[in-house]
């Protein structure tokens, strides 16, 4: 298991952060240093005395999104940051940094982001996003979704539209299904079919994503869709696999949408999007749960297609996405360290 699964960085107040780690990272005291970026951590003075297991650090209001270097008394140091980008008007916005990749390298912090829609951004949100140096957005939404969930970034990145229908080849797929059934199990199996179709029928869109990544644009790259869970989740998973991240860690990242996607708050938007009307005996909360709450089985369907059709991740990356050993090496050079 990647030690990152046992490390948490969470904001607990204005300019105040709580860091915690388990014994897989360190059983000895840890020194903590902070900075505005991984390459700008101030190592002249630790933030606090050495700590075991957890520490709260204040006085960081001047750093809108701090990164930390954890230096144990025994063992190598590790750079960590908050996984979630805290926004008032965006959903499921996360940094893919830190995960263990090929050759003992780690995915670079602040280079690859994933998110849901950004349709309610506040001025404070825009100011925070301006600090992330996002210069390219790969948007998996369809045209109507982009119209209904418009959320332009003040930093004016290049937007690459890679529209994938939020259904089985058809944006009205779930509209018809919700009109026909009140059974959540039917919806779960439908999501499984949709997930399989992403690496069968929509694979060309993900190949285009890799074209963007291989061009190595400057600044950071954001992948997004409406919820940032399925279409973006598959995109993020394929990128992490290409960087040499283990399946277990890729699945861990995929399932973080359970924590960072506000399912209850997004229920009204989802009901409107798929025209789900209340009727006697219909439990809309249970019916919509498969679309709002991420399940491990969703990404496992993708892995099953890769294994059945291609035999290995390496063959899948090369044959389906045009990402062979040379391309993987270029990606790892650009997005890991």
Image: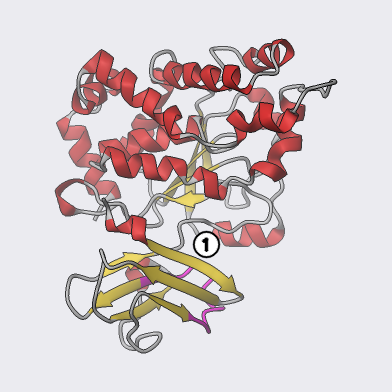
Reply above or below: 66 against 267.
Answer: below
Name the residue at 42% across, 63% down.
Answer: 8
**How many numbered circles are shown?**
1
Task: Work out whether residue 85 or residue 48 is closer to the camera in this orientation and state it.
Answer: 48
Task: Work out whether residue 107 or residue 254 is closer to the camera in this orientation and state it.
Answer: 254
Reply above or below: 41 against 233.
Answer: below
Q: Extreme right residue here?
A: 280
Write the start and end of the magenta stretch as one range: 57-68
Q: Quadrant of residue 149?
A: top right
The location of residue 66, given as percent across then percent down, is: 46, 70
Q: Is residue 70 left or right of residue 293?
A: left
The location of residue 221, given as percent across then percent down, is: 44, 45
Q: Residues within 10 Å of mark 1 (few under 14, many from 20)?
A: some
Tell whether position 58 is magenta.
Answer: yes
Reply above or below: 291 against 172.
Answer: below
Element marked by disc 1: loop
Q: Extreme front residue here?
A: 281
Q: Is residue 155 visible?
A: yes
Name the residue at 20% across, 24% down.
Answer: 312
On the image, numbered disc 1 is attached to which residue? 131
Q: Is residue 193 left or right of residue 40?
A: right
Q: Is residue 337 left or right of residue 119?
A: left
Tell whether position 294 is magenta.
Answer: no
The location of residue 184, given as percent across then percent down, is: 62, 23
Please name the predominant secondary structure of the magenta segment in the image: loop
Name the residue at 27% across, 47% down.
Answer: 334
Name the residue at 32% across, 45% down.
Answer: 249
Q: Is residue 119 visible?
A: no
């Amino acid at each position: 298991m990647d030690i990152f699964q046992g490390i948490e960085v969470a904001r607990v107040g204005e300019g105040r952060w709580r860091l915690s780690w388990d014994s897989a990272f360190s059983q000895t005291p840890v020194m903590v240093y902070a900075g505005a970026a991984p390459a700008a951590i101030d190592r002249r003075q630790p933030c606090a005395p050495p700590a075991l297991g957890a520490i709260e650090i204040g006085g960081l209001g001047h750093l809108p999104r701090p990164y930390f270097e954890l230096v144990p008394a025994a063992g190598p140091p590790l750079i960590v940051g908050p996984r979630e980008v805290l926004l008032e008007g965006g959903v499921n916005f996360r940094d893919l940094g830190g995960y263990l990749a090929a050759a003992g390298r780690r995915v670079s912090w602040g280079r690859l982001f994933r998110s849901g829609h950004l349709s309610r951004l506040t001025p404070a949100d825009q100011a925070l996003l301006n600090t992330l140096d996002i210069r390219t957005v790969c948007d998996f939404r369809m045209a109507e979704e982009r119209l209904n969930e418009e959320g332009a970034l003040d930093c004016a990145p290049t937007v690459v539209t890679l529209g994938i229908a939020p259904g089985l080849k058809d944006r009205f797929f779930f509209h018809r299904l919700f009109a026909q059934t009140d059974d959540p199990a039917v919806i779960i199996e439908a999501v499984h079919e949709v997930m399989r179709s992403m690496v069968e029928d929509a694979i060309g869109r993900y190949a285009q994503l890799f074209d963007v990544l291989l061009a190595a644009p400057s600044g950071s790259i954001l992948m997004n869709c409406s919820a940032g869970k399925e279409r973006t989740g598959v995109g993020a998973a394929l990128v992490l696999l290409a960087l040499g991240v283990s399946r277990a860690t890729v699945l861990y990242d995929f399932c973080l949408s359970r924590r960072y996607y506000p399912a209850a708050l997004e229920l009204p938007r989802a009901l409107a999007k798929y025209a789900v009307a209340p009727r006697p005996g219909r439990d809309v909360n249970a019916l919509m749960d498969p679309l709002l709450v991420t399940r491990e089985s969703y990404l496992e369907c993708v892995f099953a297609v890769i294994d059945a059709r291609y035999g290995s991740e390496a063959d899948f990356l090369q044959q389906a996405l045009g990402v062979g050993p040379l391309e993987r090496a270029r990606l790892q050079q650009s997005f890991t360290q």
